[in-house]
Amino acid sequence: MTEERFMSTATSAAVVQEAERFGRKPGRRVDEIVRAGTLAEGVYELVIRDAYVARNAKPAQFVNLYPADASLLLPRPFGVAEVTGDEVTLIYQVAGAGTRQFTQLAAGDAVDVLGPLGKPFDLDKSANYVLVGGGLGIPPVMLAAQALSVRDDVTVTTAFGYRNERFADDLVAQYVDAPHSITNEEGNVIDLLDSIVPELEAAAKAGRPPIVLSCGPTPMMKAVAQWGGRHGAEVQLSLEARMGCGYGACVACVVDTPQGRLKVCKDGPVFTSEQLGWVV
Amino acid sequence: MTEERFMSTATSAAVVQEAERFGRKPGRRVDEIVRAGTLAEGVYELVIRDAYVARNAKPAQFVNLYPADASLLLPRPFGVAEVTGDEVTLIYQVAGAGTRQFTQLAAGDAVDVLGPLGKPFDLDKSANYVLVGGGLGIPPVMLAAQALSVRDDVTVTTAFGYRNERFADDLVAQYVDAPHSITNEEGNVIDLLDSIVPELEAAAKAGRPPIVLSCGPTPMMKAVAQWGGRHGAEVQLSLEARMGCGYGACVACVVDTPQGRLKVCKDGPVFTSEQLGWVV
Amino acid sequence: MTATVRPSEPMNVIEPHEWRHGTVVAGVKWKNPVGTASGTFQLDACGDYYDVTQMGAICTKGVSPVPWEGNPGPRIAESPAGMVNSVGLQNPGVDHYLADELPKLKELGALVITNVAGHSDEDYAEVTAKLADSDADMLEINVSCPNVSHGGMSVGTDPATLSRLIGRLRKMTDKPMIVKLSPNVTDIVTIAHAAVDAGADALSLINTLVGMRIDIDTGKPIMANRTGGVSGPAVLPIGLGFVWRVRQAIPDIPIIGIGGIDSGEKALEYLYAGANAVEVGAAALTDPTAPMRVARELDDLLDSRPDLAAKLAQGKSW
Amino acid sequence: MTATVRPSEPMNVIEPHEWRHGTVVAGVKWKNPVGTASGTFQLDACGDYYDVTQMGAICTKGVSPVPWEGNPGPRIAESPAGMVNSVGLQNPGVDHYLADELPKLKELGALVITNVAGHSDEDYAEVTAKLADSDADMLEINVSCPNVSHGGMSVGTDPATLSRLIGRLRKMTDKPMIVKLSPNVTDIVTIAHAAVDAGADALSLINTLVGMRIDIDTGKPIMANRTGGVSGPAVLPIGLGFVWRVRQAIPDIPIIGIGGIDSGEKALEYLYAGANAVEVGAAALTDPTAPMRVARELDDLLDSRPDLAAKLAQGKSW
Ligand SMILES: Cc1cc2nc3c(=O)[nH]c(=O)nc-3n(C[C@H](O)[C@H](O)[C@H](O)COP(=O)(O)OP(=O)(O)OC[C@H]3O[C@@H](n4cnc5c(N)ncnc54)[C@H](O)[C@@H]3O)c2cc1C
Ligand SMILES: Cc1cc2nc3c(=O)[nH]c(=O)nc-3n(C[C@H](O)[C@H](O)[C@H](O)COP(=O)(O)OP(=O)(O)OC[C@H]3O[C@@H](n4cnc5c(N)ncnc54)[C@H](O)[C@@H]3O)c2cc1C
Ligand SMILES: Cc1cc2nc3c(=O)[nH]c(=O)nc-3n(C[C@H](O)[C@H](O)[C@H](O)COP(=O)(O)O)c2cc1C
Ligand SMILES: Cc1cc2nc3c(=O)[nH]c(=O)nc-3n(C[C@H](O)[C@H](O)[C@H](O)COP(=O)(O)O)c2cc1C
Ligand code: FES
Ligand code: FES
């Protein structure tokens, strides 16, 4: 009897190769951990080697990690924060049993992975992209900074709200035109957004209207959506929900919208504030 | 939610210390692995550091190992094969999911342990102890050789039956007066016992009557019990049974005897052939 | 630090395969004995990962007469080696199904089991009527969801109610009709008999077990719907027990075994317990390619079990 | 290689402890809300590992009128995060229990729940009669084992049968009487009502779920008895679901929650689901000191939950 079955037995390269040969997406596979460490108190970094994710991940897409403990079945979704060559950076905090186990992983260990998953931010327009992240909602918007940094037709502004330590500012510095951040003690991201309104207006006048890309706690995102409404800015929000599969098979991860219950994992995680009915 | 609970979180030393302070036996604990390797094809050695087991284990007693995979709950019992200082040697083969996982353990890793458990061989008499082991029934009788080697009033004879490679002969050589073994190809342990009857008779005449200590597959042990009956030798048999706890709490591990259903883990694993009604 | 066993030679699971061991369920030939389980397969998601025509059968999500919005979120919680879901049969309704998912599946060439959901006898009848002339290869009547018109009790837990419903549906279609049974019952054998006597061509079991989890920080249930259905490896021995008991009581009815299957070995346990085929549910959520892997592993395992393989090929069970 | 979390500061679980949070079950004060579960405790085994008087209660193995030999071996199989047992209530009978284990437990000072087993109403009555004048603090009537005199159905699955039995036992003793319910039923609420209306002072649930495993090398069930009872972490969400439903239906009856508890957190989930106390079963088999550890962890968790702790201390539930 083999009870340990829920762990993938297939290496990343082999799975990806087979999938691509037959025109499919690769299923669950084992990735090598390149680096594991701490970015700030309670904020961990995990860098996995996954050429497929590295090649394909778009901003706000996520990957599922699976605990090695076969008694923990469900996926643990994490936004792809950065991509370097075939290395993929995830940034997370400990929320429960699964993330607690991930903190024990070290370089050379293996972890089961699926992805990239989900509908990314829409970055088609020429605009001033304002990345509004709160807490561990920052990692999912980070990749937008990296992706946009290569384009001439956009400006990248960040407005990150940290609990205390500014764990991501250095990491995104190279990608951002106008970096801003705030800690809980100093205020919240709405305060921060308000303070940079003149800057945003200037950019808008220069032909780069603001498009807000946001991820964070729900109350924060609702406030961001309303802020966007007040300031006439398009707002794209990356949501979180408890997931059963992460790839659209189970309909567990719904969010209530005026158009009905949508899947966060496949219809999202990115929704516009209009889709969600979060604008007043 | 912590699902990984079935793994002990307590180090061996702390658990043993607390238990001894309050006059109890130590519960499940985490032991360090000192050495892990292969003795023969399909035969693995695992050396754990457990001062308590090292101090207390008696021949035919066993320890429970528990897979790290929290979805595998039941104990995996293994006879203590040898003790050196605070190091305890176990020898096993792969039988299923748990033992397959154990083969991945390496020095420096940890494994959950309980024990020593069970009723040991009765070695009170001055005698020629004939250790009859078959296959992976050899490890549980090995400790008898080591324990008896320090006594002046006994002779130690082995009659080991191997599938092919003689993985234990060297390990017990230093403890044994009259080592014998046989492989499947050469014959079975009954053939071997028959062949050493003159030797046993000589020892008996010199005041050391044979006492057979045996462990192995059930058909082999039944044959050994009958061989003992034919040759007037006392026979002690160490049985195996599927266990729920290994320490006497669940009554899962029964063997049918003329006196009713007895617990292999606590009334045994050692039973005399009379207790089992296995003599003709 | 502890170890996990990871065989170094992974099996290729999605490459086209010559299936050596098929099965027959209620007269319908499956190329292998492994299907997807209802509610854990969606073509637009799972089809990305493997060729759905390679499965023994594709069992779709529950289809209701009109679109259902299901239960509010959160809809899922984890449990040791299991999961608890309260999706509540969210689906776009039978008309959408007939216009969209079914034609797509049939165009690809999949063998399709359509799972039929309802809140009342009327509901089931309405869906069955629309499916009667469809391209669906088999119907699976899910009688283990709360039945509003019968005082909140499930149709699948009362033999008389079940018998009446199945008898009614039986008259509406010649399609092979599988009745999917609930494990939340005292006496599965009586219920199985009721379904068979009323005209079921096959039985599938088990659906999920009622369960829940509580968040100890809030003291409240994790799922908005409070309770849900437990599935996954945790339910394996329970599913096997149900299949075994039904097989002992009814020697000839085709049975599809479901519950906790995530490997060829576990699928094989169900076949030895008396199933003619199996469906893979929760495992597919944890790895999209799991149903294909189970099918491949089982095909290999059946090579060394010619007696069992022969029985399956003849539509018989172990 | 993968990792397991092993906190570096282990909790001392067996040292004497000043319990801060007790409970009251049917008028009986427990020093903490954690007891051992029947069939997983034996004084001569568990007492070696911890001081049994430190437990909230010790629930003994099932006691029958005469010695029972139980089922043949193998009696146990593993399942994902669970185990399946078919011990079949092997025990040396009530006379031996009264002469041996009970006096020893009471001499030590343990709070003892005696689990009562029977094949027929007569059996239960005979054991209850002998226990009526004993030192046992509480009785737990196990009505979820096969009942031969009722055509193989369990007493605990038919409300009328259960009501008659409990009514009869009620007249025989003033001891607080807990009725232990089976999860293998369609409608737990009706059964719980039947037990309470007939005079049960408290309910405990769940007992094991019917299940089995099969050896794929032989094609035969692993256990000699074929099917057995599933317990362990795998059943946690199922046990919680049963306790929750009974608590919603019967606000005031004391409930002992059982099923899959192996940590203070999981015990706490049961208390939030509506239990007044819990029992730890399978976890004790996997670590003899588990029941003590659960009790210690729960004592700590209740420190930050004064409202819940206060209710328990007053004999109320969440
Ligand atoms: C699209 C998406 C992107 C995310 N990106 C990040 C990120 O970049 N960094 C980060 O730290 N966290 C991120 N999260 C949250 C992260 O997935 C959870 O914190 C994590 O799954 C908790 O797992 P656990 O085992 O520690 O907690 P447990 O409580 O033990 O988990 C039990 C189950 O609940 C789920 N769960 C628990 N908390 C959450 C939550 N807040 N949201 C969704 N599911 C949850 C788990 O996935 C698991 O299935 C993201 C979530 C989503 C949906
Ligand atoms: C007292 C005693 C001493 C033993 N000493 C040794 C030894 O020194 N060396 C050695 O190689 N083996 C020994 N065994 C057998 C060993 O315990 C099993 O091979 C091992 O538990 C199998 O575990 P698994 O996870 O690989 O198999 P699985 O089949 O996955 O195990 C499932 C369950 O069945 C039990 N089980 C499976 N096979 C056996 C068996 N043959 N006997 C008892 N329980 C079994 C397991 O313990 C586990 O609980 C001993 C058994 C007993 C009872
Ligand atoms: C998320 C989810 C949704 C489900 N939806 C349905 C459904 O719509 N109809 C149905 O008959 N069964 C449904 N089921 C039950 C499964 O088909 C299956 O019977 C059950 O999950 C047991 O199998 P498993 O352990 O392999 O998951 C659902 C299960 C899950 C996990
Ligand atoms: C080996 C074993 C023996 C059991 N024997 C009894 C018994 O004699 N009487 C009883 O009421 N319950 C018995 N049970 C059921 C447990 O008391 C408990 O209700 C069940 O195991 C669920 O709890 P758990 O998941 O913590 O084990 C037994 C359980 C096990 C595992
Ligand atoms: S998590 Fe399964 S559909 Fe979104
Ligand atoms: S294994 Fe539990 S009593 Fe022997």
Image: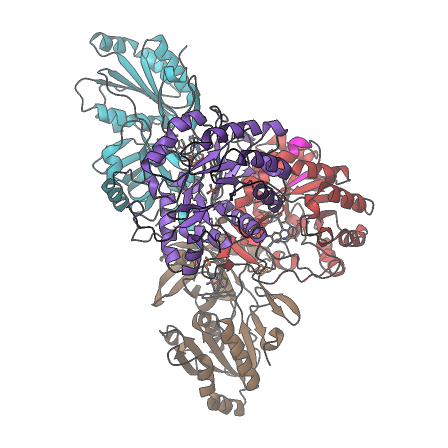
Chain colours: A cyan, B brown, C purple, D red
Give left or right: position of C108 versus B210. Answer: left
- Residue B139 painted magenta: no
Which one is nearer the viewer's eye here, B256 or D256?
B256
Quadrant of image for the C terminus of chain D:
top right
| Quadrant in which residue A85 is drawn | top left
Relative to A184, is A208 above or below?
above
The residue most toward the left is A152
Query: Is residue D288 at all visible to an observer of this figure?
Result: no
Which one is nearer the viewer's eye here, B247 or C272?
C272
Across and down, in percent, residue C216 comes to: 54, 33
| Quadrant in which residue C302 is drawn | bottom left
Relative to C26, is C306 above or below?
below
> Where on the image, by quarter, is ligand 1?
top left
- Residue D251 painted magenta: yes
Which one is nearer the viewer's eye here, A62 or A149?
A62
Q: In the rendered structure, which segment of residues is drawn in magenta?
A: D247-256
Count the marks: how many?
0
Across and down, in percent, residue B3 comes to: 48, 42
Across and down, in percent, residue C270 comes to: 48, 51
Query: Is residue C313 at all visible to an observer of this figure?
Result: yes
